[in-house]
Image: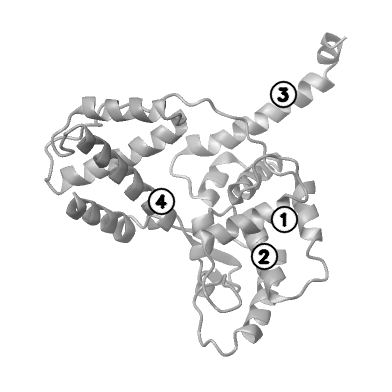
Amino acid sequence: MFENLEKFIEYIEKERKYSDKTVEAYQNDISDFVTFLEGLSLDYLKIGYDGVRLWIVELSEQGLTNRSINRKTSALSSFYKFLLKIEVVDTNPLFLHKSLKVEKKLQLPFSLKEIDAVRAMFEGKDDFDSLRDLVVVEMLYCLGLRRAELVALEVEDVDFYLHQVRVYGKGAKERIVPMLSELEQLLKKYLDVRRIVLADKGEIKALLTNNSGKKIDEMLVYRIINGYFSNTTTKEKKSPHMLRHSFATHLLEGGADINSIKELMGHESLSTTQAYAQINLSELKKVYQSSHPRGRNNKK
């Protein structure tokens, strides 16, 4: 098993360019599945869908949500597709598998007021860490980046002449995102300070680093966002993705068309982008029901 798993991990790392976090999750999920089958004296290369179904039942009995189970079966399906590709198996036991139904939670984005409140926390702070943290906040919000895309950025990806940033998204797909003047000025200030702080470190390709010149990781990005926004919002979720979410929603509210937002965010499918439109519509309905005379009358 280990040889096939190692080949698969190398494939998703080097060819598919999956993030470190995704690679680790896939490796753990597949290992757990094979261990489960071994406990039943089953061979992962010879099972049918019945073996997969037993695992799903086991995961459900452990209390995992349908969303978590879907993530694990997605990893498993990718693994078997790879084994099919390299002719280790003849069939994919998850070929006819359908994802479990997941109740969609309406997750509202950060408001502009909440984001501006975080920005205000940096006023008058010109030290390296503060500037770096503000760049993290502003690039997530102004460019609509995924966390993995942000930490992967290199200095050469920022084009001050053309006022744009080159981003490598899922599957190493490249896209260009325009850069606002305010963000440009912040980045220049950050790079000027970094040049002084890291003067003895030589050339550093990574755009976002710690004060030793090492590229920051996704966990630090999460801690930065969660830490600052814990002081400005009562929303339960305070993650980097919430700023990407805010980017899309605020563009919609500003009149941007959904196809343009799709391109800016690097979505393959328009349906993914439309999820943000649904949230915007939900808020619109609330305003309508509270503002229209008939809606107000129904509350009496």
Residue 160, visible in the rendered structure: yes
Query: Badge 4: few (under 14), some or many (20 or more) residues near its Cα, within 10 Å?
Result: some
Residue type at mark 1?
Tyr
Rendered view: 211 above or below 7: below
The label shown at residue 133 is 2
Query: Badge 1: few (under 14), some or many (20 or more) residues near its Cα, within 10 Å?
Result: some
Q: Is there a contact, CB below 8 Å, between mark 4 and mark 1? A: no
Q: Nearer the viewer, mark 2 or mark 3?
A: 2
C-alpha separation, residue under disc 2 versus residue under disc 4? 24 Å
Using residue 183 as the reference point, say whether residue 171 is left or right of it.
Answer: left
Residue type at mark 4?
Thr
Q: Residue furthest right?
A: 300
C-alpha separation, residue under disc 4 versus residue under disc 1? 25 Å
Using residue 107 as the reference point, say whether residue 203 is left or right of it.
Answer: left
Q: Quadrant of the C terminus?
A: top right
The label shown at residue 228 is 1
Residue at 22% over, 41% down: 80
Q: Earlier in the sequence, mark 2 or mark 1?
A: 2
Residue that mark 4 sits on: 22
Q: Earlier in the sequence, mark 2 or mark 3?
A: 2
Q: Nearer the viewer, mark 3 or mark 1?
A: 1
Residue type at mark 2?
Asp
Residue 176, visible in the rendered structure: no
The label shown at residue 285 is 3
Work out whether residue 152 or residue 3 is closer to the camera in this orientation and state it. 3
Q: Earlier in the sequence, mark 3 or mark 1?
A: 1
Work out whether residue 220 or residue 196 is closer to the camera in this orientation and state it. 220
Q: Earlier in the sequence, mark 4 or mark 1?
A: 4
C-alpha separation, residue under disc 2 versus residue under disc 1? 9 Å
Residue 158 position within the rendered picture, expressed as x and y whole percent measured from the top left:
56, 70
Q: Is there a contact, CB below 8 Å, between mark 2 and mark 1? A: yes
